[in-house]
Amino acid sequence: MAYTTDDKGEMTLNKKWLLSIVLAVFVSLLAACSEDEGAADKKEENQEETSEKQSEQAEMPEPDLENVPEVVAEVNGEEIKKEDFEMSYQSQFQQAAMQSQMTGSKLDQEQLKKQVADSLVGQELLIQEASTRDYKISDEEVNKTLEDLAKQNQVESKEKFLKELEKQGMKEEEVMTQLRSQLKIDKLIAEEVKVEEPTEKELKAEYDKIKEQQASADTEQEIPAFEDVKDTMKQRMQQQQKMEGTQKLVKNLREDAEVTVNL
């Protein structure tokens, strides 16, 4: 979702959210990779111990934003400001805090800060690279994207969506400019990241792996039939390819860039 909600229930908007759509997955991808390496967590055998842990963790931690510098990072001379970092961090912090409560693990805020800073650096590298390519973005593409975003955020029309953005301090011209930048990034990724359709054999192997993990987790949840989830798994595996390819692209761009992170 593009919006977050403050303690008054009002929608707030990061002015750079349009350009963070592609790399919003970066922090979650880093977390997912570490989870995959340690795969299939075992459930607590003793239910009393589980509820005890949950009660201890009932209180949601607060984001620690002390000592964040005014300029969090510089990428080829472009600054990533404290304001943009804090908005991204608070959004990722909410997700990470909820996950830590569910798993019973301790949230490492210093590590999360570094991950968020790296994702913003990656975002800026993609923006800079896309701006060097001769990508043409039509008005039709921009309007279609705007309509899709309005629908995703449950706003009746793109006109009302633009009004909501204006309330958050973003003029229509600024929105359109950022959307064009985002669409250029999409074209960059489509050009540089190869996504192949998984074979039936690969899908079946992934299905069997999930089924085995589910069995070892000692849960009564029933696994759907392979044919029922095949299409969903195909999309998931292709999305994974796209995320990993984007991550590799950013890594290559970073090797040739001047990057300073001040955290």
Image: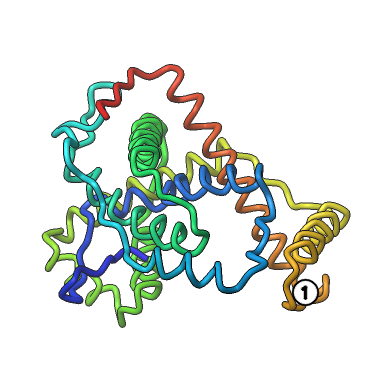
Q: Residue at x 38, y 43 (%)?
A: 112
Q: Residues within 10 Å of mark 1 (few under 14, many from 20)?
A: few
Vertically, is 244 above or below 231? above
Q: Picture coordinates of residue 158 (x, y %)?
A: 29, 73
Q: Picture coordinates of residue 183 (x, y %)?
A: 40, 50
Q: Picture coordinates of residue 216 (x, y %)?
A: 78, 61
Q: Residue furthest right?
A: 201
Q: Picture coordinates of residue 194 (x, y %)?
A: 64, 40
Quarter location, residue 258: top left
- Lateral position of residue 91 relative to residue 186, left or right: left
Quarter location, residue 49: bottom right
Disc 1 marks which residue?
223
Quarter location, residue 213: bottom right
Q: Residue at x 33, y 72 (%)?
A: 150
Whether residue 131 can be seen here = no
Task: Please name the amino acid that badge 1 sits on.
Answer: Ile
Q: Could you say whether the residue bearing mark 1 is in a helix, strand or loop?
A: loop
Which quadrant is home to the N terminus? bottom left
Vertically, is 175 above or below 144? above
Depth order, front residue of 254/148? 254
Q: Which residue lies furthest to the bottom in this view?
A: 156
- Lateral position of residue 47 relative to residue 93, left or right: right
Depth order, front residue of 233/65? 65
Q: Which residue is drawn at 13% across and 34% down?
A: 70
Which quadrant is home to the C terminus? top left
- Lateral position of residue 114 relative to residue 198, left or right: left
